[in-house]
Every structure is written in structure tokens, then in C-alpha cells.
Amino acid sequence: MSASYDISWLNYINVQMNRYFPLPFVVFGTIGLILNMIIFTRRSLCNNSCVQYLLYNSLSNLIVLYWVVITRIVSDGYGNDLSLRSDIFCKIRYFLTYYSRTLATWFIVLACIDRWLSSIQAKQRFNRVSFARRMSVITCLICFISYVHVLFLFGIQIDSISSAKSCYALAGIYRFLSDLQYLLFYALVPPILMFVFGILTLRNIRRRRRLIIPTVYARTQLRTNGNKRRDTQLLIMLLIQVLIIIVFTLPFAIQKLVDTFSSQTQQTPLQKAQYSLLIAILRLLSYGSHALGFFFYTLSARIFRNELLNTLNRIYRFFTGKNCLKQSTSQVMDGFFTQNDIDGMKSVGL
């Protein structure tokens, strides 16, 4: 009786968690991602190659929220799983889930590589917006080709013993390889690459600061300082995003790793209920890497806060015809220059 009660209670918690807990991620994530896309397309930022990757990351995360999270709420929270009734929907559901989540992480990898190339002063063409857009298209094609097998080899599976239906990969070696691919492409390799290129970028920046040669041209120096400050703050935003992905994705990666290599382990009904609840919690945490970037950007980077205030001011002015902010020159340029830089520019006629 006690074991049966525990199973029922765990299953109830699982259902309620899948029904209500993802909703804040959807609501606040939507607001944050829309503001991200508005800010990243502003004139002061859109000509930066790193920002292009962050913009495409935001677009991918929006797909994750409105496809991956919503379908999970409907299926696990309300028991209305269309993927168990339509083989086509089953294939499309897993394909878009794998595709969008993988794209979101790999755009951050590309942004890390972009900052690393900038830190070693690589050829300028690698840090152009046009190059970033080409690399984004190539990444989309590679991810599409990598997961196209899902559209053919996933579907509704029927257990030979219990006759229970499930939407997943074909049983056997293919299921193992598919799980392993998703584990590597989404949860393990991208965070490792982000960490490596992030460390290399920070090391190169510190090395360059030791080698800075004072210049006699104040005009050029001040403009260079502004660009460097912008790049530094973009790097901070990027490293914060990397940290978010590692923190929120690592537990999910560990669970997938255990699940992939122990799929044949027999479990009691109580153990299955406990494990299902654990998976629900880890999956819920993984949504954070797709929904919370905006809030950490706002806290970490002055340039982002300034652009956010300018954006909110434009929206307010559109509806009321008035400014809600009285911006001075120093406030507008605060994200790029210090007050000493601004005074210096005035003194040399900038």
C-alpha cells in the first residue's frame, strides 16, 4: 500500500510539474528573447559579427520555447500526446526538438570562436557580418543533415510485452547511436568548446593588454578604446551565456549519458516513477539555458542595459509621443566610453 501510494504521489508531482513549472520559462523567455532580437538589430550593435550569432541564438531559442516546451506541457502535463496518435507528428516533434536545441548551442560556440579570432587579431574577413551570416547558414545546413535521419527512423513504437506506445527511435543499435549523437552534439561537445575558446580568448586579451603601446594620436586612441569596450562587454555577455548553458545543461547531459549507457537496466515501478520525476526536473532546468539569457545580459553588460533603455524609450515615445528618458551625451555613450574618454574627445574636437 505504501509503495503504491508513493508511486501515485510521485506521478502526481511529475504531472503538475510538467503542467505549470515550464510556463514562467515561456512567458519571461518570450519577453526576453523578443527584446534580445530588437536590441541585437539596433544600428549600434548589428554591425558586429558576434552579435549576429547571438541574434540567431535568440531565434533558435524562440523555437525551443514554442515547440519543445509547449509540446512537452501538452503531452506530459495534460496527457494529450499527439505524437502517440500520429507517426508524422512524432517524427517532426523529435526532429525540431533536436534541431532547434542543437542550433541554439552551436550559435554560441560560433560566437565564442568569433571572439577568439578577434582576440588573436585574425584576418578581418572572419569578423565581418557577411561571414557570420554565411557561417550561420552553413551551421543550419549541417545540423539539418545531421538530424535528417530522425524523419525516417523515429516513430510510434509499441512494446512487445506491455503493448505500451511510445514516440521514439527504433529499438536496437540505432536508438543507442541516436541518443549518443544528441548527447554529443547538444549537451557535451558545445559546452566543452565554449569553455575552451572562452579561456583562450581571456588569455589572449590579458596578453594583449601587457603589450599595449601608447599612441600619440588621441583621436584614433579614443575611438579604439570605444570599440574595445564594446567588444569587452560583448565578451562578458557571451561568457555569461556560456556559463548559463553549462550550468543548466550539464545535469541534463549527465542524465542522458546515464540513460544512454544503461537503457537495458530493469527498474521497479517505484524506481521508474522516481526516475521519471528526476528526468522532468533536469529537463525543466535545461529550459533555463534557452529562456534566461536576456536577464543575465541585462545584469552583466552596460552596453546591453543602455540599448535596452533606448529601446524601451522608443516604444514609450511611439505610444505617447514623449521621451521617458532624458539622455545626455554621456549617458548615450556610456556603454562605449568612460567620462574621461568623452572629455578627451571634446578636447580634440571629436
Image (spheres, rainbow, N blue to C red):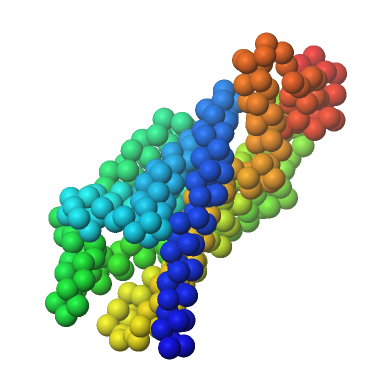
The answer, for residue 111, to whether it is visible in the render is: no
- Asked if residue 84 can be seen in this view, the reply is yes
Q: Nearer the viewer, residue 9 or 189?
A: 9
Vertical side of 25 occupied by 346: above or below: above
Where in the figure is residue 209, as x and y percent of width and height?
71, 47
Residue under the point 63% across and 15% down:
319
Q: Residue at x 21, y 71 (%)?
A: 164
In the visual, does 167 lie left or right of 284?
A: left
> Which residue is most to the front?
1
* Residue 60 position in % (x across, y down): 41, 43
Residue 249 in the figure: left or right of residue 334 = left
Q: In percent of the image, x 25 and y 72: which residue is there? A: 176
Count of all numbered marks drawn on residues in the image: 0
Vertical placement of 326 versus 65: above or below?
above
Q: Nearer the viewer, residue 241 or 13?
A: 13
Q: Position of residue 78 (x, y in %)?
A: 38, 56
Q: Specify whether 88 is left or right of 318.
A: left
Q: Nearer the viewer, residue 188 or 91?
A: 91
Would you identify the image quadrant in which residue 347 lies?
top right
The N terminus lies in which quarter of the figure?
bottom left
* Residue closest to the eye, 10 or 61: 10
Q: From this viewpoint, which residue is outermost toward the top?
A: 321
| Residue at 36% over, 75% down | 259
Give percent across and percent down for residue 186: 39, 59
| Placement of the C terminus among the 4 image quadrants | top right
The image quadrant that residue 115 belongs to is top right
